[in-house]
Image: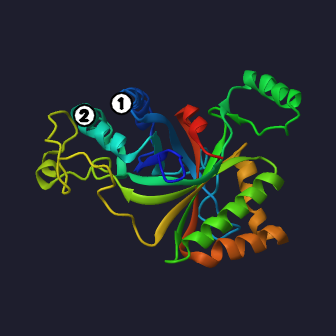
Amino acid sequence: MSNNGNPIIAINMAKIANRPDSYETMMKVGPKVCITTASHPGFLGFEQLLQTGIHPMAGRYGGGAIDMRNSTPPLNPMGMYQYTVWKDVHSHEEMHHDNFDTIYELCGHCLDMVVEGPWEPYFEIVASDLPQLMGMTDVPAVLGDAFAAQRPVPKVALAGQRSIVVGDHGIMHGHEQDFEQGAQATLKWMKANVPGMIGWMLLKQFGVSAIGSFQLDPEGMLKATLGANPPKYNTNYGDKVHSTPPIPPQTPTQYLVHMEWESPDHAHMGLGHVMVDYELRQIHNEGVLRHLDRGPYYMAFAPMMEQGLWRRHLKQ
């Protein structure tokens, strides 16, 4: 667990070719990778997200839209973010060590659709306010329990039916604490006041997994092919299991703002509030934009596969 008692998240980031056979491969290989990963102690859950578009930030990026699934031409390549949630770094690194041959063979079947990546940074969950995932048939019971206990009506996160927006922010050195406070103030205001916002997390990168990023040693790099016959488990950081990220964190410090919305339309209109609502604009300008070295850049995703019980471990 991180310093605040939250789990840590490894996000495997890649860009893949947006074509029919890519989806077929994901549906065949993805579950096998998840089953293999879940066999290791310290694994708490996962979310696999496929990019649907980008947020144009009121015209700042005019070449895209928040929902490009049916655009002509379609979004290509598209991002694929795979969150795996862990007790600690050691558990994740050990899983890759103990299952190296299996993971290598499974992932080898996916390389012919990869355009860029993978890259697997580690993130600390600085703060979060995410509800538990549920199905539509769960909603009456959850609402009923809230009414019976005289609690406020809770936000509802429907499994597989949300729009997830991830904002990449690079923060000026020495401004990290101010940004964290400003980002949380912005997100709390939005959840309380903006229709359709379900919840959020603020994530801080603290390093990168070498083996999870497929950063093998030179011999392994040259042996890597699109099939089996795996090389030895080894990277430029050696063949031992690490308890801290072997690749150091990037600078400027990277933060991801993870937001969940009822739909792409809610996300598009909701994010626009930081520019058109006077009160929120001041909070966001001074708490977020004032501290940036890079960004923000927002990508929109839809859940493909998920096991959200890890949310129970979050410290609200």
Please state if 109 lies on the left or on the right of 177 as rendered.
Answer: left
Assess disc 1: are there few (<14), some (14-19) or many (≥20) residues with their C-alpha within 10 Å of its C-alpha.
Answer: some
Q: Which residue is mark 1?
A: 40
Residue 125: percent from the left, percent from the top?
A: 54, 52
Residue 160: percent from the left, percent from the top?
A: 62, 33
In the depicted structure, whether residue 236 falls above or below residue 253:
above
| Residue in front for this viewpoint, 301 or 63 | 301
Q: Which residue is mark 2?
A: 98
Would residue 98 be visible to someone looking at this image? yes
Assess disc 2: are there few (<14), some (14-19) or many (≥20) residues with their C-alpha within 10 Å of its C-alpha.
Answer: few
Q: Measure the alpha-carbon separation of dots 2 and 1.
A: 9 Å
* Residue at figure coordinates x 61%, y 70% from the top left: 179
Q: Which mark is residue 30?
A: none
| Residue in front for this viewpoint, 211 or 78 | 211
Residue 30: percent from the left, percent from the top?
A: 41, 32
In the depicted structure, whether residue 174 falls above or below residue 239:
below
In the depicted structure, whether residue 156 falls above or below residue 139:
below
Q: Are marks 2 and 1 in contact (CB under 8 Å)?
A: yes
